[in-house]
C-alpha cells in the first residue's frame, strides 16, 4: 500500500475482499479517503448536501479494486494526480463540462475508476439492496425513494 498521508477530516472508506456501497444522502464531506484491496466500492456523490463550490477530493489506494463514482452531470473529473501501476484507467464515457471539479489523487495498482452520470448513475443505484430498502421505507411512510435520485425530496 502507499505511504501517503490520509486527507485530514476525510470520509474514510475501507474495503478488503468485499463490496461497499454508500448511496443516497450518506455524507456532506468534500474529501474522501478510499482504501480497497480486491474489492468493489460505489460512492454516490450526487447529493445536494455535498458542496461543489470547492473541488471535491478522492484519495485512492487501490489494489486489484474497482471504484464506481456516481456524479452529477456537470462535474469535471481531474485524474492528473492519480498514478497507475500495471493496469488501470479512469473510465468516463461522458466527461462533464461544468465548473464543479472532482480531483482523483493517489495510487491504483491494477485498479479501475468508473464514472457514472445521469441515467447510468441512477440505474447503478437502483441495482442495490439499499434501493430496495429505500423503496420499502418510502412505501411505509408514504413518501418517495431518494437512493435513485438524491436531489428528490423523500416525502410527498
Image: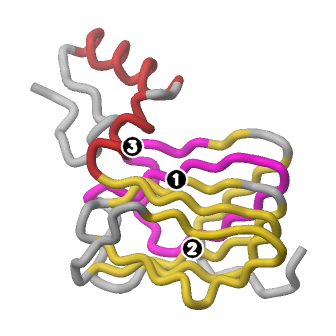
Nearest to N terminus: mark 1 or mark 2 = 1
Across and down, in percent, residue 63 comes to 83, 63
Alpha-carbon neighbours of circle 2 within 10 Å: few (<14), some, or many (≥20)? many
Give the residue number, with chain letter if any, for mark 2: 58
Q: Residue at x 35, y 43 (%)?
A: 120
**Residue 15 or residue 108, whichever sits in front:** 108
In 3D space, how far apart are the residues under numbered discs 3 and 2 (Cα atoms)? Answer: 18 Å
Across and down, in percent, residue 95 comes to 34, 70
In 3D space, how far apart are the residues under numbered discs 1 and 3 (Cα atoms)? Answer: 9 Å
Across and down, in percent, residue 53 comes to 27, 82
Tell me the tag on residue 146. Answer: none
For marks 1 and 3, give the one nearer the viewer: 1
Alpha-carbon neighbours of circle 1 within 10 Å: few (<14), some, or many (≥20)? many
Q: Quadrant of the C terminus?
A: top left
Compared across the picture, whether 114 is left or right of 106 comes to left
Q: Residue at x 49, y 57 (%)?
A: 69
In 3D space, how far apart are the residues under numbered discs 1 and 2 (Cα atoms)? Answer: 10 Å
Q: Is residue 31 above or below residue 123?
A: below
| Number of residue marks | 3
Nearest to N terminus: mark 1 or mark 3 = 3
Marks 1 and 2 in Cβ contact (< 8 Å): yes
Q: Residue at x 83, y 74 (%)?
A: 86
Can residue 32 be found in the magenta stretch? yes
Dot 1 falls on a residue whose secondary structure is strand
Alpha-carbon neighbours of circle 3 within 10 Å: few (<14), some, or many (≥20)? many
Give the residue number, with chain letter if any, for mark 3: 24
Give the residue number, with chain letter if any, for mark 1: 43
User: Which residues fall within the magenta stretch?
Assistant: 21-48
Classify residue 149 by image quadrant.
Answer: top left
Amino acid at each position: 500500500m502507499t505511504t501517503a498521508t490520509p486527507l485530514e477530516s476525510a470520509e474514510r472508506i475501507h474495503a478488503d475482499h468485499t463490496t461497499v456501497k454508500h448511496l443516497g444522502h450518506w455524507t456532506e464531506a468534500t474529501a474522501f479517503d478510499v482504501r480497497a484491496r480486491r474489492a468493489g466500492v460505489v460512492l454516490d456523490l450526487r447529493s445536494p448536501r455535498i458542496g461543489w463550490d470547492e473541488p471535491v477530493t478522492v484519495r485512492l489506494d487501490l489494489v486489484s479494486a474497482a471504484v464506481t463514482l456516481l456524479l452529477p452531470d456537470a462535474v469535471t473529473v481531474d485524474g492528473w494526480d492519480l498514478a497507475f501501476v500495471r493496469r488501470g484507467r479512469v473510465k468516463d464515457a461522458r466527461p462533464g463540462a461544468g465548473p464543479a471539479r472532482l480531483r482523483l489523487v493517489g495510487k491504483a495498482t491494477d485498479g479501475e475508476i468508473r464514472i457514472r452520470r445521469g441515467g447510468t448513475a441512477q440505474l447503478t443505484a437502483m441495482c442495490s439492496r439499499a434501493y430496495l430498502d429505500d423503496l420499502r421505507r418510502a412505501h411505509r411512510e408514504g413518501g418517495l425513494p431518494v437512493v435513485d435520485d438524491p436531489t428528490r425530496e423523500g416525502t410527498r
